[in-house]
Image: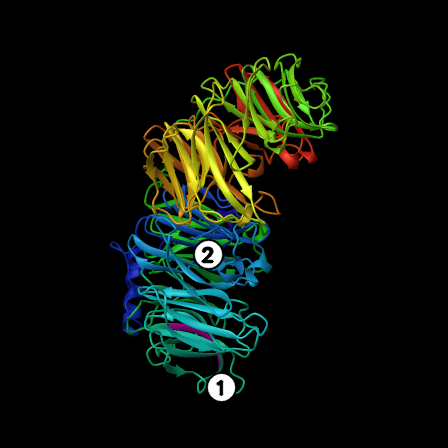
Amino acid sequence: MAGSTKRAKGVLRGRPRRTALTAAAVALALAAAGLGAVLLRPGGAGGPEFSVSPEAYLDTAGDLGMEEVLAVGFRGDSAVVMGTFLHGRLRLAVVDAGSGEPRWVRDTGTLIDADAVLGGAESVGPLAFGEVSAPVLTGAGDDWSVVVPYAVTGREGDVGDITLLEAGEQGVAALSGSDGSVRWKRETPGVPRVLDGAGGTVLAGAVASGTGEVTSLALDAEDGGAVLWEHEGDWVHRLAGDTALGESAPAGWEPGADATTEGRRVFALDARTGRPAWDLDGVFSESGVEDATEGWAVLYAVPREEGAPARTAVVATGSGEEARSPRSRLGTGSPSCAAGEDSLLVCAQDAHGSFELVTLAPGESGVERSTEVTGLDPGAADGLRVHAVSGGRIHLTASPGDGEEAGTASFVIDRSGAVLAEDLPGEVVAAAPDAIAVDPDPSDGTGRIAFHRTADGGAPPSPEAGTAPEAEPMPIERAPRLAVSTSGTAAPDRADADVDLRRIHDAVLAGGSLVYAGEDGDGLLVSALDPDTGEERWTLGGEDGPDAVGTLGAGSRRLAVAGGDGGVLLVPHGLDGGGNGVSAVSAGDGEVLWTAPLGGGSGFLDHLVGSEEDLFAVGRIDYGDSSVAAARSEVRELGSGRLVHTEEDAEAFGIGGGVLVVERRTPPYGSGPDRAPAEDVAGVDPRTGEERWSLDGRYERPRVAEVAGDRAVLVVHGGGTAVLDPATGEEVASSATRADRCSGTAEPLLVCRAGAAGSSGDGGTLPVVVEAGGAEASIRLLPGLPAPEGLAGVERWMFARDADAPGGGAGEGSYRMLDAHGRPLRGGLPGRAISADGEHVLLLDGELGELSSAGARITVHRRG
């Protein structure tokens, strides 16, 4: 942090580390005074110097896409981060604490199981602006969970505050730290608030909608979240071993809302039974809980004596009695406290013009208190605050006094008061033995948190980043050979073809042609252009369609390409005598290879499924009264259109690995967003219908997101995402994050999205990269990539909007190319790649389909 060394030296007097003689003298003096042992490291000089990596290995804004961080904590080899994104929605990310690699991510509105979605940000973290709290974690070792709010809304995706308030069920849930699966859920009588957790107990609160009545609950984290007790009317929000601490307060107050004690009174309950233990009404007229650990609570309270000022008090939680010592009258300033991973609680407070540390070890019978922080001149600083404790290290900040340079100094001491480091890169908000999370500049209001590696002694090791080499950029000529644009979006480079399109629905390179489906003044059309010259090769639909092909329907908006070389286009259309048909068209010259009527049975052609094999599939649906009355999938030969197999009560999603992948449902069921979950996902022999594999209850609410030839089947379900081998159905990779809306061919990348998708567009989604490689695959989360609505994947490259480009990513040259890890390879591209062959690449700026009414432009570039 620029200037931090100078500011630190302004408040640290002389040498930052005490000598062994001084330390020993202080220890003897404290012991003689009966103030408890002061722990010193061997040698008495405060141990080895504490060092911090100069570069952050994780940035919550750039890497996790968070606007403001609400909570940060470390557990084992993981870090838990909760923050806001997309105008205040909650994002929960569990990342590798060594590398920052996201392990799983949940957002407000995304499913955490088959029925419930993650709740909102108002249910976690402090209410005080700009503060960062600790997440509520339960369990030990590798078997730990993070406690979160949830809601059952009946929908997934774009879930706002009103939807959450009107949810049929709300409560708190424990998600496994390893994979995000739900350990347990517990409904609450109102909007939930996650409060505290320790051992096997979790405290939660609920505010009833309309009345605002408060109910506090204690839950058994080791017994499926069973309710231990409920307490109505007051917030019980802090655990201290077997004691739960609550506060009676004026209506509308919530824990963390303010730091004053006006109208608040502390009381204690048995944490497991809820029976009253004690209150402090006879001792203090007002009191509030600042922090607590097993056996001890730190309060800020107003004594009952007339005119007595508010002061810090340490009470034994077993009895409510105040701890006594020769210096029992602690300072009048409000304390700041933090606890470490071993529950050691350290508080700093102004003790009548000097600063004092109060160290409370869980379960111990005495208050261990040091004198002034060694080397700190009380006259040259104020506002000493404790921010984090870990591994015997105490992270503090102090503000220079009057006349000193403005700013805040961040430094580290040990329990003896010896200064270990004075040049930290920001205000520490959470710490682990080998890492810290810091706010680089609390005054800038960005809410950004950066993670750094730490070590005792020499420089800390480099972040445990992946060793995958950076890919070479796809060679793309900068100047386009050709462009196809909707009306009003043509660029002044004179490359635009002479077309008058209202919308572009789809585009692909096939058979050496640029083939696009669009809409002009005469309706739908499918047309092919020479990708170098723009010369029209053929057109179907409009006024110039061949006699063999009738009116194009809605099914023609998406281009279905088939054949091993991708040279055959499947075009659905109406027949002159009525009914539906499909024609196979040569993508190169427009020759209609054959036309087959789709007669009998279900009459409505829902979709076509192309493949790289000599077969294709047709989805057929009959609609009843606002529901699907019948559904079937037909498999046909690519060379003739001949029907070879029909799969009843099944919707086809792809042919790959020698199987037809289908979702099974028994009609009637709703369509669109009301469509029932699949009863099963299966792979069947496309010619005989013999079942090759089936999920058969392996996942809750499975749904096929993508079938990529013989390389991957992507299935999303209530617990996340799975990559399956198409031939066998065996799982080869999984993630707790649900990913869909994919692009790419899994050669080797599928670039997908996870998160909200609704009326707000895809601004709330995060990119998910599936890298397929035969019998192995990986799923990588990249929540920090901006503007995922402009995301696409082709072959082994990703493309996304560049938020740093001129115009905020909305102008010409506003896209960039990235590798599979999100590392930038090239910028200044006029669009994202949506199709490629051996000679050309299609780049798209704008949106296809109905959204293309806002404008879309496709440019064709040579590779090389």
Q: Is residue 426 above or below residue 689?
A: below
Q: Which region of the structure is painted magenta?
A: 297-305
Q: Secondary structure at mark 2?
A: loop
Q: Is residue 828 above or below residue 340?
A: above
- Three-letter residue code for mark 2: Ala
Q: Which mark is residue 116?
A: 2
Q: Position of residue 786 (x, y in %)?
A: 55, 39
Q: Position of residue 302 (x, y in %)?
A: 50, 80
Q: Nearer the viewer, residue 135 or 842?
A: 842
Do the numbered discs 2 and 1 sit on residues whose CB atoms are within 8 Å?
no
Q: Nearer the viewer, mark 2 or mark 1?
A: 2
Asked whether 299 falls inside the magenta stretch, the response is yes
Instruction: Give the residue at x 52% y 21%.
Output: 836
Magenta span: helix, strand or loop, mainly?
A: strand
Instruction: Give the residue at x 48% y 65%.
Output: 193
- Three-letter residue code for mark 1: Arg
Q: Quadrant of residue 430?
A: bottom left
Asked whether 41 falls inside the magenta stretch, the response is no
- Asked if residue 16 lies left or right of residue 599, the reply is left
Q: Quadrant of residue 826?
A: top right
Q: Nearer the viewer, residue 540 or 324?
A: 540
- In this rendering, the count of numbered labels is 2
Q: Nearer the viewer, residue 760 or 252?
A: 760
Q: Position of residue 435 (x, y in %)?
A: 38, 48
Q: Quadrant of residue 515?
A: top right
Q: Secondary structure at mark 1?
A: loop
Q: Look at the image and tell me whether residue 331 can be seen.
A: no
- Asked if residue 299 lies left or right of residue 228, the reply is right
Q: Is residue 573 above or below residue 60?
A: above
| Residue receiving disc 1 | 304
Q: Nearer the viewer, residue 770 or 413?
A: 770
